[in-house]
Amino acid sequence: LLRADSRQLEATRKTLEAEARRLQVARRLALEKDPAEAQRLDDQIAAVNDQLRWTNDQLTALSVRPTLGGTWISTDSVERAGTWMRRGDSLGIVADLSALDVRASATQHLAAAIIAEASPRVEVRAKGRPTQFTTGRIQMVVPAGSDRMPSPSLGFAAGGGIETRPSQGEAPRSAELTFEVRINLDEPIGLLPGQRVVARLDLPRRSLASQAWRAVTQALQERFRI
């Protein structure tokens, strides 16, 4: 799947191999003249071999093999061959594209309406691509509100629709509590993990008076945090 190289580890391995050879020669000479020195060299050889095994394990780990079947999805479109990467940098994921779920965020009032009135069937469109859509079914609405968004990409700064509040050195938090809505897709045609989508659902039609009363109720709830 992926192969990386580390010049530092390669140089360390060559240095350790040279040191192991030097110690082996010194040990053979010491066996004839000084058995105690030979024993001391045995300990040094064992220590160098331990370091060499660890270095070889690290070099082997630079060749990444997937632990599950799926499709490789790069985190960006930049060609990585020959570039320098830091330890822990994200390069991509292996994903099963045959079964994708959507994690959406809804305000307190919208979440209540979804639970009480919305049809479980939804239409899901790729954001910015109105012709790319599929359908799905609402699996659940997480009952507890949270300021932790399902994904940072839902925030204003990343082009999403959720207002966020300033944060230092941590994932952005939503300005108000939101509720996670989980949607099972019927067919994830053309969609990829991490892609932003827009979910459209149907609510019952309401009269103007009913809509006005609901707006007043919501404003009071927000004002007094009911």
Image: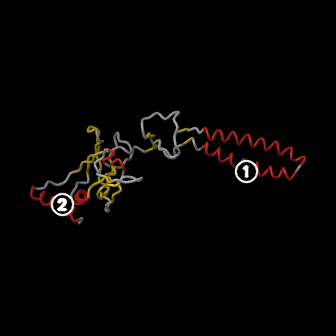
Question: Label 1: which residue?
Answer: 47
Q: Crowding near pointer 1: few (<14 within 10 Å), some, many (20+)?
A: few
Q: Tell me residue 109's x, y (percent).
A: 23, 59
Residue 223 shown left or right of residue 84 in the figure: left
Q: Position of residue 77 (x, y in %)?
A: 42, 35
Which label number is shown at residue 166? Answer: none
Q: Secondary structure at mark 2?
A: helix
| Residue 110 image point, x, y percent | 23, 56
The amino acid type, in three-letter code, at marker 2 is Ala
Q: Please tell me how crowded label 2 is: few (under 14), some (14-19), or many (20+) other residues with Cα within 10 Å.
A: few
Residue position for label 2: 219
Q: Nearer the viewer, residue 206 or 158?
A: 158
Labels 1 & 2 near each other (Cβ < 8 A) = no
Query: Who's the residue at 86% across and 47% down the image?
Result: 30
Q: Is residue 119 left or right of residue 77?
A: left
Distance from Cα at disc 1 to Cα at disc 2: 71 Å
Give the residue type at disc 1: Ala
Badge 1 marks a residue whose secondary structure is helix
Q: Quadrant of residue 61?
A: top right
Q: Is residue 1 visible?
A: no
Q: Observer-nearest residue: 42 or 97?
A: 42
Q: Is residue 76 visible?
A: yes
Q: Residue at x 13, y 57 (%)?
A: 211
Compared to residue 200, the image places residue 147 above or below, namely: below
Q: Is residue 95 left or right of residue 43?
A: left
